[in-house]
Image (cartoon, grey):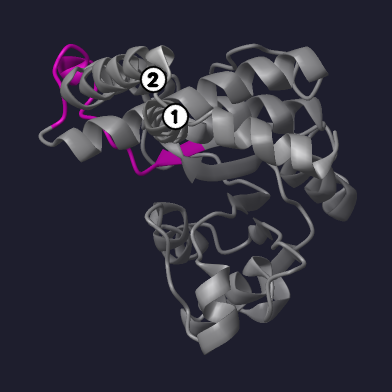
Amino acid sequence: MPAALSKLMNFLSVPSNVIAALAVLGLVMLLLRRRSGAAIAAVTLVALAGCTLSPLGNMLLTPLEQRFPDTGFPTQRPDGIIVLGGSYDTTTHGYLSTIYLEEDTEPMAVVPDLARRYPEARIIFSGGTDPSTPGPSEAGIAKQYFISFGIAPERILIEEHSQTTEQNARFTAGLIHPTPEARFLLVTSSYHMPRAMGAFRKAGFKVVAFPVGSRTRGWSEFWRPAPTATDNLRRLDIAAHEWLGLMAYRLSGYSNELFAGP
């Protein structure tokens, strides 16, 4: 898929982006004195109210986060611990040489504890960086982070070229060549786990989910909106992007499952 088309599809998969685009379009049409401008503005206001004041975000996000419930630390020792990228602000790091974390920090936060619990397991970080971004890759930053917590450098493997979850799985498989007997712990955000599990299974991995960083409180919050309008909109953005990603991965053959489960 051409890069420009991919970026456009990613933009349109986020409801807040669509609402903002409609607002701009409505304003332009009103300035041009087009009758359709008022209709577009009205639709935008209704959509904004529905997305920010209703439990729609929780209704879409909860099934994603509860697909792989948190069952604690596995009793069977894994051969490796795979951590997916997305926790670092690589742009800021590239300009200021300082490690800045994004909002999904939990995958990185649990690694030192996992490394201590499973001392024989390799630590594999998969996450590339836009080539136009100056400075080290996200994987390179992650390696520095792991070493700072006392994890031996020889235990750490990094895959620093992937830009998508499918590439995370495919490039990591090319790096470590998993055998059918090998078991890997897959660490990523709870809402992202179904798509990640489908992609890694497709790539030949025997993976055990280790979801972290839930944004909802489980099924008890399914029918209730979040405390703030911005939380509702952010949850809807995340959920919509993931559900569309699940459908796209199944249709493109990146996963053999539409909604991967345990």
Question: Pointers 2 and 1 in contact (CB under 8 A)?
Answer: yes
Residue 218 circle label: none
SS type, badge 1:
loop
Q: In the displayed image of the protein, which residue is found farthest to the bottom?
A: 97
Along the line of sight, the residue nearer the viewer: 96 or 71: 96
Q: Which residue is mark 2?
A: 37
- Going 48% across and 39% down the picture, which residue do you hit? 210
Identify the amino acid type marked 1: Leu
Above or below — where is 243 with respect to 129? above
In the rendered structure, does residue 214 fall within the stretch colored magenta? yes
Q: In the displayed image of the protein, which residue is found farthest to the left?
A: 227
Identify the amino acid type marked 2: Gly
Segment tinted magenta in the rendering: 210-226
Along the line of sight, the residue nearer the viewer: 243 or 190: 243
Q: Which residue is mark 1?
A: 32
Q: Could you tell me what secondary structure mostly forms the magenta stretch?
A: loop
x and y percentages locating residue 31 in the rendered image: 38, 33
Above or below — where is 245 with respect to 105? above
Of callouts 2 and 1, the N-terminal one: 1
In the rendered structure, does residue 130 fall within the stretch colored magenta? no
- Going 61% across and 25% down the picture, which residue do you hit? 245
Q: Residues within 10 Å of mark 2 (few under 14, many from 20)?
A: many
- Going 44% across and 26% down the picture, which residue do you hit? 29
Along the line of sight, the residue nearer the viewer: 234 or 259: 234
